[in-house]
Image (spheres, grey):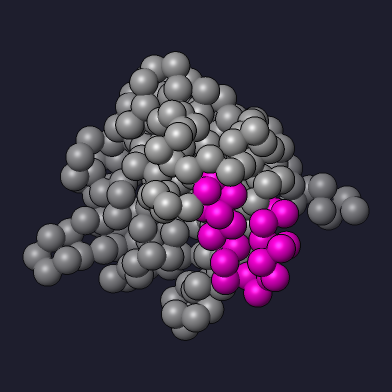
């Protein structure tokens, strides 16, 4: 699995008698834009939590940016998340009394940076998502689409290796959802690896790679061959250098 920024091998997750994941294997190469799609109960949200190191698998191997998460302490996992993983959720999770910049600055709260530097990074991130004019606005002054852009800015402010987006357009109208998806494409074009969890088949079909889940298993991976080819190409380039 060399060259992968994310790799799961035979991952099982059980909650008592419930088997949420039944042996999932998945590899994502740097720079991919992947949709993980499936109905409720398919295991996609459980997989997101494990990929994001918010939960540990019952068995199997999870590797993020070259790190075997099974060998890491909780503090080390927190650092891994801070350095490599950005999260975007359906319902934004913004602090209602804080400005857009303050919400975004929370994304690097544990990076050990001075407050002034965190604010500067937040303003820069808001500019990247087209909200440079909303820096001092609070969530009640923003539209749904703007709130999601603030959430995306918070997710990317630390320069993550992987952006995990859980139903990022689910709470938005069609126009706002399209704008958010276009922003995710732009971030991916800039080199960010993006993994979108969704039940929206139309959204999934618009992305370069679709991983379909059902009953805790990967039932179909439309881009597995492309991912393997990208990994081989990356390895060939490294060897040539």
Q: Is residue 9 above or below residue 31?
A: below
Q: Is residue 2 left or right of residue 15?
A: right
Q: Is residue 173 above or below residue 149?
A: above
Q: Is residue 231 above or below residue 172?
A: below
Residue 115 belongs to magenta span: yes
Q: Residue at x 65, y 74 (%)?
A: 112
Q: Residue furthest right?
A: 241
Q: Residue at x 33, y 27 (%)?
A: 200
Write down the quadrant of residue 79 in the picture: bottom right
Q: Can you give x and y, in whole percent of width and height, for residue 144 in the image?
A: 41, 30
Residue 102 belongs to magenta span: yes
Q: Residue at x 69, y 41 (%)?
A: 191
Q: Residue at x 26, y 49 (%)?
A: 43
Q: Can you give x and y, in whole percent of width and height, for residue 145 in the image?
A: 46, 29
Label total for image: 0
223, 156: nearer the viewer: 156
71, 99: nearer the viewer: 99
Q: Quadrant of the N terminus?
A: bottom right
Whether residue 31 is visible here, answered yes or no, is no
221, 30: nearer the viewer: 30
Residue bounds of the magenta highlight:
99-121
Write down the quadrant of residue 173 in the picture: top left
Q: Is residue 101 left or right of residue 166?
A: right
Write down the quadrant of residue 80 in the picture: bottom right
19, 186: nearer the viewer: 186
Q: Can you give x and y, in whole percent of width and height, for residue 125 in the image?
A: 66, 45
Q: Is residue 8 left or right of residue 81?
A: left
Q: Is residue 14 left or right of residue 70?
A: left
Q: Can you give x and y, in whole percent of width and height, for residue 52 in the image?
A: 44, 59
Whether residue 54 is visible here, answered yes or no, is yes
Report the predominant secondary structure element of the magenta stretch: helix
């Amino acid at each position: 699995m060399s060259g992968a920024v994310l790799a799961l091998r035979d991952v099982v997750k059980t909650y008592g008698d419930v088997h949420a994941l039944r042996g999932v294997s998945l590899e994502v190469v740097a720079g991919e834009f992947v949709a993980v799609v499936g109905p409720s109960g398919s295991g996609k949200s459980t997989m997101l939590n494990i990929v994001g190191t918010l939960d540990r698998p019952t068995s199997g191997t999870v590797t993020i940016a070259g790190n075997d998460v099974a060998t890491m302490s909780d503090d080390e996992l927190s650092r891994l998340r801070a350095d490599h993983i950005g999260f975007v959720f359906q319902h934004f999770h913004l602090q209602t009394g804080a400005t857009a910049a303050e919400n975004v600055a929370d994304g690097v709260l544990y990076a050990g940076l001075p407050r002034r530097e965190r604010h500067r990074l937040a303003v820069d991130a808001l500019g990247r998502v087209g909200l440079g004019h909303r820096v001092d606005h609070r969530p009640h002054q923003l539209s749904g689409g703007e709130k999601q852009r603030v959430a995306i800015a918070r997710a990317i402010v630390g320069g993550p290796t992987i952006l995990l987006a859980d139903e990022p357009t689910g709470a938005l109208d069609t126009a706002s959802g399209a704008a958010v998806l276009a922003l995710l494409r732009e971030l991916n074009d800039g080199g960010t690896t993006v993994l979108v969890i969704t039940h929206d088949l139309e959204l999934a079909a618009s992305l370069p790679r679709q991983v379909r889940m059902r009953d805790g298993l990967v039932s179909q991976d439309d881009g597995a061959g492309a991912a393997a080819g990208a990994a081989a190409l990356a390895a060939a380039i490294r060897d040539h250098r």
